[in-house]
Image (spheres, rainbow, N blue to C red):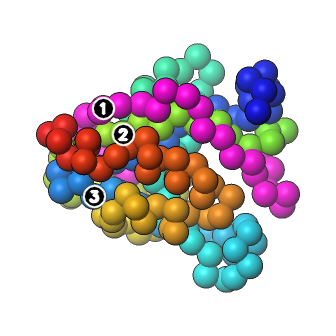
Amino acid sequence: MDHKDLIKHYRPNVGVTLFNRDGHVWYGQRIGDFSGFGSGSDDAPRWQMPQGGIDKDEDVVAAAYRELKEETGISSARLLTVTPGWLAYDFPPQYRLKNWRGQRQKWAAMLFEGKEDEIDLQADDYQEFDDWRWGELEEAPSLIVPFKRHVYEELMTAFIPDYIRAAH
C-alpha cells in the first residue's frame, strides 16, 4: 500500500498488548453485535485488545496509555516496545467511520504492574467491554473479528512471548 494512501484514507489508531507477569495477554469482550462482520455466524468473536484513535498532534505512546486507561481503568503499566511501522486493516463494507477506508495502527506492548482490582471496564463514559480475561498471545487471531485478524497475526510475530517474559 502506498504511504500517501495509508495517511490519507486510514484513521490513525493505537493498540495495546498488555502482558501480565506470567506472560499472558489482556483481552476484553466487546459490547455489541459483530455477527455481520465477516464470520457469517451470530457468535462472531468479540474479544480484542484495547485500541482507539490517536488524537490530532497526540504522541503514539501517550495515546496508548490514554486508551488503556479509558477502556480498562489500568494506569499501572510499563511500556516495553512499540511496533516500528503501521499495521493496517480495511473496514468491512457495512462498517464505515466517517470517510476512512480502514485504520492504520501502531501497537504498544506493555507490562501490567498493578493488581487486578485496578481493572475497571466502566472507567470511561463510553464502555467498550463487558468482560475481560487473560489469555495466550497465540489465541489472538481466533478471538478477533475476521477483518482485523491479519493484524493480530502480525502482532504474534512482533511481540514474541519469550522476549516479553524475559523483560521483567
Amino acid under label 3?
A: His
* Magenta highlight on residue 83: yes
Quadrant in which the N terminus appears: top right
According to the image, label 3 marks what residue? Answer: 24
Mark 1 residue type: Leu
**Left or right of 42 in this view: 156:** left
User: Residue at point 62% right, 21% down?
Assistant: 56
Q: Residue at x 26, y 41 (%)?
A: 163
Based on the picture, tell me whether residue 119 belongs to the magenta stretch: no
Mark 2 surroundings within 10 Å by alpha-carbon count, few (fewer than 14), some (14 through 19), many (20 or more): many
* Distance CA(mark 3)–CA(mark 1): 16 Å
Q: Position of residue 31 (x, y in %)?
A: 56, 66
Q: Are marks 2 and 1 in contact (CB under 8 Å)?
A: yes
Which residue corresponds to mark 2? Answer: 109
* Quarter assignment of residue 134: bottom left
Q: Is residue 17 above or below residue 136?
A: above
For residue 83, above or below residue 21: above
Start-end of magenta stretch: 71-98
Q: Nearer the viewer, residue 139 or 69?
A: 139
Q: Is residue 122 above or below residue 90?
A: below
